[in-house]
């Protein structure tokens, strides 16, 4: 199902449904006040869009488990997110509830089946990690959960999603997304029965420490992924074990096509890397939807040390690839966030969105923006839509600028001579 189609359904059907359910909820509250246990027993987390969202949610899940170690955690997401949820061990595989969304009828069928399933599970708490999605808000209400936590618009124009939550949190767009998610988890214990401070939640954000686990790969897994790369081209075997690996992820997702760095820039960058670093191997990565674009890059570069490996890995194998590589270059999207689960150095290019809210977590990332006055132009308040048809903000990030950072990262001697090597590079190279 196309993203624009999903937006239209969420807007026109979602608004009407939220309004109708809100009227029912108002009547119900007249006769009975919401009651819920101080300690939740079954918690459903809702984050259906974007696989990388699970990475940002991980610190929140860790906090939930710290607060309520005996609670059962369920996770509802689109089917393609299952593997990253399992890798992060957010919950056990049997508690991951997935939805198909390729076709409208599959999405509707899975939605109805899911609502029936979660009602049978007797979920007592839902946490909606979508910002202002009506769909997840509706599912949360229909789940039958007594405690429903999520973001609420208060006096913001638009973004109507009814009055279906029991814990309304204000969305602070000055906070990194991972911290906004963390506050949803904190609402579980910060709001005692019978109290309702508004807006939620009153907490010093400087005290929130966001960290991610590092997913390590076994020696056998590393050897296996290197062998598979070499199998793509017999000539590669003489490079694979002795040379450094640079990963390039063009990430041609149709979800937010405006955030892509131009393909000719990737081509120019790879040519510079291969020309100036004879001991470097460039590997193109991505999902099956990226294969065609990556093939164009590979053929344009025309060098045996550049190989197209897109659509060839599972999520676990992608993590293995990160663990045997030195640098990843990509624009804002999933690969940058998955890479933050490893020690690979990552260069992430931002334009239509800002690293202040969406930057990868951890010290190994360098975020680059061009600092144009019109950027960022998409956000959760405009449903990530922009009138722009030509992303100057990404085009303004020049190949030479990105190459200079790659060159510094490859120069191990300079990096080791600097005590806070990557930290210092971030200070120097990131423009926000």
Image (tube, rainbow, N blue to C red):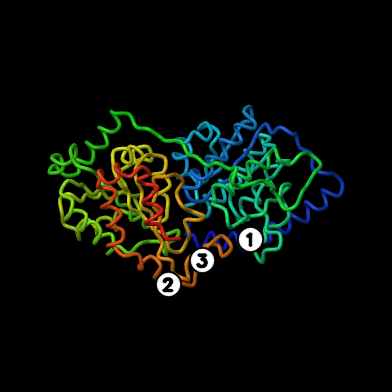
Cα–Cα gap, marks 2 and 1: 28 Å
* Element at label 1: helix
Which of discs 2 and 1 lies nearer the camera? The answer is 2
Cα–Cα gap, marks 2 and 3: 11 Å
Residue situated in front as seen by the camera: 87 or 113: 87
Q: Answer few, some or many: residues within 10 Å of disc 2's Cα (few below 14, many 20 plus, some between 14 and 19).
A: few
| Residue located at (39% from left, 52% from top) | 426
Q: Which mark is residue 416?
A: none
Q: Earlier in the sequence, mark 1 or mark 3?
A: 1
Which of discs 1 and 3 lies nearer the camera? The answer is 3
Q: Answer few, some or many: residues within 10 Å of disc 1's Cα (few below 14, many 20 plus, some between 14 and 19).
A: few
Horizontal relation, residue 81 to residue 109: left or right: left
Residue situated in front as seen by the camera: 310 or 219: 219
Q: Answer few, some or many: residues within 10 Å of disc 3's Cα (few below 14, many 20 plus, some between 14 and 19).
A: some
Cα–Cα gap, marks 1 and 3: 19 Å
| Residue located at (45% from left, 49% from top) | 360
**Residue pointed to by mark 2:** 389
Q: Which quadrant holds residue 192?
A: top right
| Residue located at (31% from left, 65% from top) | 398
Horizontal relation, residue 299 to residue 378: left or right: left
Residue furthest out toward the right? 31
**Residue pointed to by mark 3:** 385
* Element at label 2: loop
| Residue located at (50% from left, 67% from top) | 377
Image coordinates for residue 88, horizontal then vertical, percent: 47, 36
- Dot 2 and dot 3 residues touching (CB under 8 Å): no
Image coordinates for residue 172, horizontal then vertical, percent: 62, 55
Image coordinates for residue 214, horizontal then vertical, percent: 42, 35
Image coordinates for residue 114, horizontal then vertical, percent: 60, 42
Q: Earlier in the sequence, mark 2 or mark 1?
A: 1
**Residue pointed to by mark 1:** 13
């Amino acid at each position: 199902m196309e993203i624009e189609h999903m937006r239209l359904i969420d807007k026109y059907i979602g608004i009407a449904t939220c309004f109708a359910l809100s009227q029912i909820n108002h009547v119900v509250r007249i006769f009975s006040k919401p009651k819920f246990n101080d300690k939740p027993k079954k918690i459903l987390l809702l984050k259906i869009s974007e696989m990388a969202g699970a990475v940002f949610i991980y610190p929140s899940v860790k906090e939930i488990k710290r607060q309520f170690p005996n609670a059962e955690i369920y996770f509802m997401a689109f089917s393609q997110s299952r593997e990253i949820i399992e890798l992060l061990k957010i919950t056990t595989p049997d508690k991951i509830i997935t939805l198909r969304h390729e076709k409208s009828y599959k999405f509707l069928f899975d939605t109805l089946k899911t609502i029936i399933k979660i009602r049978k599970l007797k979920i007592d708490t839902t946490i909606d990690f979508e910002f202002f999605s009506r769909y997840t808000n509706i599912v949360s209400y229909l789940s039958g959960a007594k405690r429903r936590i999520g973001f609420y618009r208060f006096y913001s124009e638009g973004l109507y999603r009814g009055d279906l939550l029991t814990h309304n949190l204000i969305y602070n767009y000055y906070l990194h997304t991972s911290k906004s998610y963390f506050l949803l988890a904190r609402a579980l214990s910060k709001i005692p029965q019978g109290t309702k401070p508004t807006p939620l939640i009153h907490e010093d954000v400087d005290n929130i420490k966001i960290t991610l686990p590092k997913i390590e790969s076994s020696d056998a897994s590393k050897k296996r992924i290197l062998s598979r790369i070499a199998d793509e081209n017999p000539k590669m075997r003489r490079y694979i074990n002795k040379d450094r690996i640079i990963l390039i992820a063009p990430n041609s997702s149709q979800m937010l096509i405006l955030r892509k760095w131009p393909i000719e820039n990737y081509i120019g960058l790879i040519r510079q890397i291969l020309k100036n670093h004879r001991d470097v191997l460039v590997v193109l990565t991505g999902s099956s939807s990226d294969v065609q674009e990556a093939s164009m890059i590979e053929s344009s570069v025309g060098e045996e040390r550049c190989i197209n490996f897109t659509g060839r890995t599972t999520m676990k194998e992608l993590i293995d690839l990160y663990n045997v590589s030195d640098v990843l270059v990509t624009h804002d999207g999933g690969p940058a966030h998955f890479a933050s689960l490893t020690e690979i150095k990552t260069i992430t290019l931002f334009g239509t969105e800002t690293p202040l809210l969406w930057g990868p977590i951890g010290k190994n990332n360098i975020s680059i923006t061009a600092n144009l006055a019109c950027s960022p132009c998409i956000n959760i308040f405009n449903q990530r839509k922009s009138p722009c048809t030509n992303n100057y903000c990404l085009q303004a990030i020049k190949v030479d600028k990105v190459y200079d950072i790659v060159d510094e990262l490859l120069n191990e001697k300079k990096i080791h001579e600097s005590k806070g090597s990557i930290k210092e590079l971030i200070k120097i190279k990131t423009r926000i």
